[in-house]
Amino acid sequence: MIYTWLAPIALSSPSTEGQTTTYLWFVPYVLIFVVFYFLLIAPARKKQKAHADMLNNLKTGTRVITNGGIHGTVVGLTDDVIQLRIADQVKIEISKNAVAALAQPRD
């Protein structure tokens, strides 16, 4: 028993027309990937690169904000650890990756 929607598939012979329709199935997937790339992937990569550049350009005396919301001034740097002064005579060590952004200078 062949269902009516399977009849054209079961009775058709291989031809170049079938290959063309097969390729047309990939067009929407390619378009979806292109849209995702320009809307999601490219901006995320740009933001990640800017954050990495900001971390590489940190210097002593720079005011930063950590991911936890702590505001402090960089007083020491190593490859992976930053020493922040968060108050008079109070210094903490944090991972370099924990720095979220540069803080605005105090007036």
Image (cartoon, rainbow, N blue to C red):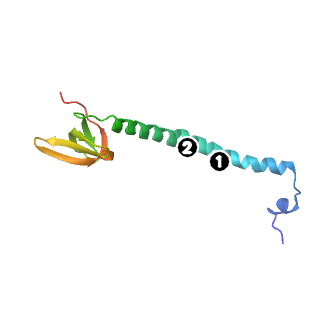
Q: Where is residue 7 in the image (x, y as percent from the top left)?
A: 84, 62
Nearer to me, 48 or 35: 48
Query: Does residue 1 appear left or right of residue 90 in this picture?
Result: right
**Callout 1: helix, strand or loop?**
helix
Instruction: Tell me the residue that label 1 is attached to.
Output: 29
Check the image and report above or below for 95 versus 11: above
> What number of labels is visible?
2
Residue situated furthest front in the rendering: 78
Check the image and report above or below for 5 versus 80: below
Instruction: Tell me the residue that label 2 is attached to.
Output: 36
Nearer to me, 43 or 72: 72
Callout 1: 10 Å neighbours few (<14), some, many (20+)?
few
The answer to which quarter of the image holds residue 52 is top left
Nearer to me, 2 or 41: 41
Separation (CA) of disc 2 from disc 1: 11 Å
The answer to which quarter of the image holds residue 1 is bottom right
Give, as a three-letter code, the residue at label 2.
Phe
Query: Does residue 55 appear left or right of residue 24 in this picture?
Result: left
Q: Position of residue 8 (x, y in %)?
A: 84, 59
The mark found on residue 3 in the picture is none
Marks 2/1 in contact by CB < 8 Å: the verdict is: no
Q: Residue at x 26, y 38 (%)?
A: 64
Query: Does residue 73 appear left or right of residue 53 in this picture?
Result: left
Callout 2: 10 Å neighbours few (<14), some, many (20+)?
few
Nearer to me, 75 or 6: 75
**Callout 2: helix, strand or loop?**
helix
First in residue order: circle 2 vs circle 1: 1
For the C terminus, which image quadrant? top left
Q: Where is residue 30 in the image (x, y as percent from the top left)?
A: 65, 44
Give, as a three-letter code, the residue at label 1.
Tyr
Residue situated furthest bottom in the rendering: 1
